[in-house]
Image (spheres, helix red, strand yellow):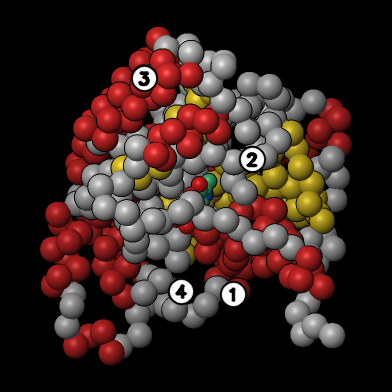
Amino acid sequence: MSYVRDNIERMRSYVPGEQPKVPGLIKLNTNENPYPPSPKVLEALRAALDERLRLYPDPQATAFREKLAARYGFAAEQFIAGNGCDDILNLCVRAFCGQGERLAYFWPSYSLYPVLADIQGAVKVELPLDANFQFEAHPSLLRQLGGVKLVFITQPNAPSGVWLQKVELQRVIEETDGVVVIDEAYVDFAADDCLDFAREYDNVLVARSFSKSFALAGMRLGWAVGPRTLIAALDKVKDSYNVNRLTQIAGEAALDDWAYLEEITRKVKATRARVIGRLEEWKFGVLPSQTNFVFAKPPAPLTAKEWFDRLREQKILVRWWDADRIRDFCRVSIGTEEEMDKFLAATKEVGSVVA
Ligand SMILES: Cc1ncc(COP(=O)(O)O)c(C=O)c1O
């Protein structure tokens, strides 16, 4: 006899990218920012390390939400803060999609969505992306949205890095009776966003993360914005104190230093363009990236797995999945200029060894 719920017994858990403690490792596998957080964030955190830690944090993260409101032009009540964007995604499943109900997501996309569906015992509906990893709202796909309670869309998509056409997403929003969550974890590296959908539609939430562009993956901070009724529902199911005191302070300070965000984002995008250019010269198939990573397919006879293994031998860690649709690619996070020089040199060597 097992004490564990059937669906938990049967499900496969989410596999996060490795965090090995190997000296000298170049870590390009989990899309962390290669640059440190804003010095103003570190200063604010140091100043907060005192006896106030005995007190619970503000359950509503009020000051943080007010800063988000001022920055993005919504009311503060339209925001909820989370312990990372993952917390927000989890809250959405708990609030909007019950056991046995339908939860849809594009495929391939963020591999946490099916895991959250399995935990809830929801029915998974995969909406396949086309050969270019774009979504086209064909009637056959839109029909699958019937009865769907929750749709997750990653924009720009991960792991492909591709920006999805907004008109096609709009079809999904209009065709579903459920809630559409647009997961914009990487959007600060893109040329556009979908905040207008959260303003216009009563069934759209946009979720964001401080882990990537703000270089705060270790603090765990995310948020969602959208219609008040949806935000109020998320607020009911969240842990009372889901964002700790220090993280709230870090988030506020990060929002106060917008120039720093712009500076490190610009650097990552410039490095991204350089890396894509070089890989394309070497005949890698690189998808157009609007994120802080590139998704690239090596030229035959080099396989993605060989590329991944050879880089790893040289202490360069990228991400490879043995999964349909994506096993021919590696996902490479954009590191510093120096890290990417080493990555490119190692790739060049691997290419010529195999050729
Ligand atoms: C698409 C997507 N959404 C959300 C997250 C999680 O973000 P956070 O670190 O804020 O929980 C990730 C992290 O890799 C991601 O790739």
**What's the CA distance linking mark 3 and mark 2?**
23 Å
Q: Earlier in the sequence, mark 1 or mark 2?
A: 1
Mark 2 crowd level (few <14, some 14–19, many ≥20, 10 Å Cα): few
Tag 2 residue: 322
Q: Is residue 163 left or right of residue 22?
A: right
Q: Earlier in the sequence, mark 1 or mark 4?
A: 1
Q: Earlier in the sequence, mark 3 or mark 2?
A: 2
* SS at badge 1: helix
**Which of label 4 and label 3 is nearer to you?**
3
Q: Earlier in the sequence, mark 4 or mark 2?
A: 4
Disc ID at residue 348: 3
**Which of label 1 and label 4 is nearer to you?**
4
Tag 4 residue: 242
Specify whether residue 271 is in view. no
**What's the CA distance linking mark 1 and mark 2?**
38 Å
Q: Is residue 26 left or right of residue 31?
A: left
Tag 1 residue: 236
**What's the CA distance linking mark 1 and mark 4?**
12 Å
* SS at badge 2: loop
